[in-house]
Image (tube, helix red, strand yellow):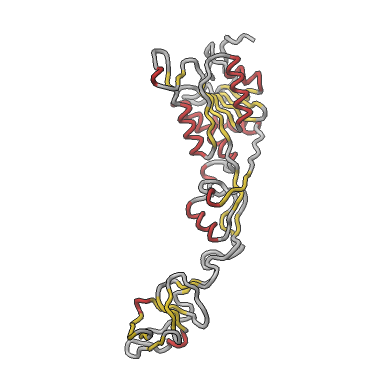
Amino acid sequence: MNKMRRSIYIDNIDVDKAKEKYYKRLAIKPQWEEIDVLESLNRVSFEAQYAKISSPNYNAAAMDGILVESMKTIGATTTSPKFLEEGKDFIYVNTGNMVVEPYDAVIMIEDVIEIEKGKVQILKAAHPWQHIRPIGEDIVATEMVVPSRHKIRPIDLGALISGGIQRLKVYRKPKVGILPTGTEIIEKIDRLEPGKIIDSNSRVFEALVQEDGGIPNRYSPIEDDYGKLKKAILKGVKENDILIIGAGSSAGTKDYVVHVIEELGEVVIHGVALKPGKPTILGIIEDKPVIGIPGYPVSSYLVFETFVRPLILKYIGLEEEEDLI
């Protein structure tokens, strides 16, 4: 093969049709892992989670005050107050304390007039279960706390923990290899000289992958050498679930990416109706998605959002952002 020949675009396909064609060729099988509930923030539940215990799991005082038998408070008014004796007619409670028999109501401390130590006066009757949180007020044991394919939010953590769930299955995060290419690419500004470009695209990809729920795995830039590029791509495919290759996807004499993918696997699409971003490569090597992304910063971001992000979401159990429950 003449490695210096210019590429030609196989396709200039509509973006939606390109995605449909490419995704149909991929055999993406999301995997799950079991993790501690405290590590589940922003992860996506693999299956519905059901409460193991009720919350609260006992009848609890909802206010600071006194626990009373509601029957003994009947008839209390401002003109005909009731007098209660501690230990006999009431006990003091704080919010969250267990309600014990024979008491069945809480009177807020603000509504209690202390006459002397151990004796109080009330001006209003209490009704049964007044200011008491019954068992299961928030969550009932066996109740579904979060559905499957649900991105865990901070508020969900509270519900999961309160429901006695300590571990849960979540979709495994895909590893996304990021391979910048180009002899002109450098990593440090102190090596900058005419004809050289500081690599920023791959750093943007790192952040985007992490933001979308994947695990970024960035490699050092590879120069425009067919053999070195082939070796790097093989390594990237073996070590990751998705491989994105920055630059080298166009029709230049040293744009080898499409030829390497053709040799190692299959180029499903080369060229999409996306501007900027036309020379995008959608390939498959060893049943894994390999995407060649143009080097122009605007097009690189656009191609990532159009083709890579949806792939990451598929791996973590989501189709698109609006599928978040």
284 is higher (above) or lower (below) than 144: above
Q: Nearer the viewer, residue 6 or 59?
A: 59
Q: Which of 55 and 259 is in front in this view?
A: 55
143 is higher (above) or lower (below) than 315: below
Most extreme residue toward the bottom, as rendered? Answer: 80
Q: Residue at coordinates 51% horizontally, 23% vertically from top-left?
A: 220
Res 243 visible = yes
Going by the image, does 43 lie left or right of 201? right
Q: Where is residue 1 in the image (x, y as percent from the top left)?
A: 64, 10
Going by the image, does 47 lie left or right of 203? right
16 is higher (above) or lower (below) than 119: above
Q: Where is residue 151 in the image (x, y as percent from the top left)?
A: 53, 48
Q: Where is residue 262 in the image (x, y as percent from the top left)?
A: 64, 19
Most extreme residue toward the front, as rendered? Answer: 117
Q: Residue at coordinates 60% horizontally, 58% vertically from top-left?
A: 50
Q: How many labels does the image show?
A: 0
Q: Position of residue 215 (x, y in %)?
A: 54, 36
Q: Which of 88 and 11 is in front in this view?
A: 88
Q: Which of the 4 image quarters holds residue 68?
A: bottom left
Res 272 visible = no
